[in-house]
């Protein structure tokens, strides 16, 4: 039996983005490879904070929603070319102290066997916006 290559599409990345907006960790993890990696846009290392393995990645995703309970990614655009993909978006969210973040960003993806092996996230740095 030949190894079939599972093609990843922009529709898959949109479904992944929709799961983010639902704050649905189970759905998100269904898109991730068994040995997945999530490199967050912020953190102490040159790559941000690196979460490796399903449990760590799931915890990293949950940390985003804990920091921004109303987190939302809008205006999404997606591209896929072979084993790589890109999603551009506008992120909005409110921290516990009431300050709001609104920034443009993107995710760079590496795929393996139809799943996301690496989600590498980037976003613009902008001072938080005070709520009136």
Image (cartoon, helix red, strand yellow):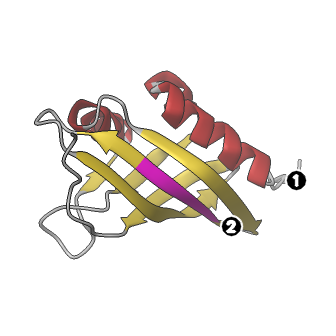
Q: Residue furthest bottom?
A: 46
Labelled pair 2, 1 in contact (Cβ < 8 Å): no
Asked if one can make out residue 8 in the rendered structure from this viewpoint, the answer is: no
Q: Please tell me whether residue 89 belongs to the stretch shown in magenta.
A: yes
Seen from the viewer's position, the closer of residues 73 and 12 is: 73
Residue at the extreme right: 1
Q: Earlier in the sequence, mark 2 or mark 1?
A: 1
Q: In the rendered image, which residue does mark 1 sit on? A: 2
Is residue 60 found inside the magenta-colored segment of the image?
no
Judge left or right: residue 22 versus residue 125. Answer: right
Give the image location of residue 102, x and y in percent. Answer: 37, 54
Which labelled disc corresponds to residue 83?
Answer: 2
Q: Report the magenta stretch's main SS.
A: strand
What is the CA distance from the residue labelled 2 to the residue labelled 1?
19 Å
Viewer-side residue, 43 vs 71 = 71
* Residue 87 vs residue 119, the one in the foreground: 87
Left or right: residue 92 versus residue 18 is left
Residue 121 visible in image: yes
Residue neighbourhood size for the residue with mark 1, other residues' Cα within 10 Å, grouped as few (<14), some (14–19), many (≥20): few
State the extent of the magenta-drawn residues as a range.
86-91
Please provide percent x and percent y for residue 78. Answer: 69, 59
């Amino acid at each position: 039996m030949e190894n079939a290559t599972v093609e990843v599409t922009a529709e898959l990345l949109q479904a992944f983005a929709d799961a983010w907006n639902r704050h649905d960790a189970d759905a998100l993890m269904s898109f991730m490879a068994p040995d997945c990696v999530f490199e967050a846009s912020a953190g102490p290392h040159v790559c941000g904070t690196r979460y490796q393995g399903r449990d760590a990645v799931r915890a990293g995703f949950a940390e985003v929603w804990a920091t921004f309970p109303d987190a939302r990614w809008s205006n999404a655009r997606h591209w896929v070319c072979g084993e790589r993909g890109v999603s551009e978006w506008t992120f909005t969210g409110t921290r516990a102290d009431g300050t709001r973040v609104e920034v443009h960003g993107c995710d760079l993806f590496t795929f393996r066997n139809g799943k996301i092996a690496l989600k590498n996230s980037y976003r613009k740095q902008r001072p938080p916006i005070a709520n009136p």
